[in-house]
Amino acid sequence: MSEKVVLPKFDIPSESAHPVVKAVAIVGALLLVSMLILGGAIWKRRAAQLAAEQRRDALIAARVAEANAAIEAAKARVAEAAAKAAAAKAEAAAKIEAAKLAAAAAKAHSADGSNGALADASSGHRHGGHHGKGAKSKGKGGDTLAAKGSSSSDEKKSAAKGGRDNAAIDKLLAQFK
């Protein structure tokens, strides 16, 4: 055996990695950790923004509902004021009508002292100038004389129902008796 055996040369790597590979692995790991931290921060910020938008929308809805309620309340107050004004206007018109009737009755009493019942009947009739056949008999559009004579008591009843003070009217009527 005289021949020599030549074995090929093998480079057996060492147990540790090359320092450049180690550096790349460390940089990659740091990049992965920083991306996770950044992603978590973005996720948390987005959740906070969504919550803030929901709170804002709820606040806007509450203010709109409050404004609508205030508008409805204002409309109700306006309607109530209009109703009160209409009631006051109707009451004033009724007072004026009662005063006109009392003045007409007083004028009729002073003009014709002997026939007071007939004067009351004509003043109690609301449609003046309609004293023809209908005023003395039961015609088509007329009432009996007795029914027209009781119109002054009807005026007192309607005035009492309206809640008005009849003292002034009673005083005027008492002066002419």
Image: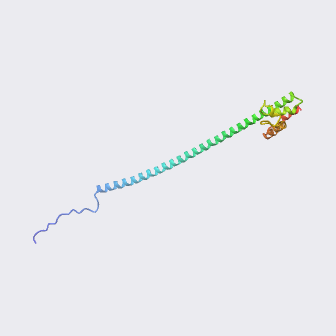
Give the x, y percent position of residue 41: 44, 51
Q: Specify whether 37 is left or right of 111.
A: left
Please state which of residues 113 and 62 is positioned toward the viewer in this rendering: 113
Please state which of residues 92 and 109 is positioned toward the viewer in this rendering: 109
Can you say whether 152 is above or below 37 in the image?
Answer: above
> Looking at the figure, which quarter contains the C terminus?
top right
Can you say whether 128 is above or below 32 in the image?
Answer: above
Q: Specify whether 86 is left or right of 34.
A: right
Q: Is residue 124 visible?
A: no
Please state which of residues 156 and 151 is positioned toward the viewer in this rendering: 151
| Quadrant of the image occupied by residue 89 | top right
Give the x, y percent position of residue 71: 61, 41
Can you say whether 1 is above or below 142 in the image?
Answer: below
Q: Specify whether 175 is left or right of 21.
A: right
> Looking at the figure, which quarter contains the N terminus?
bottom left
Q: Specify whether 177 is left or right of 54.
A: right
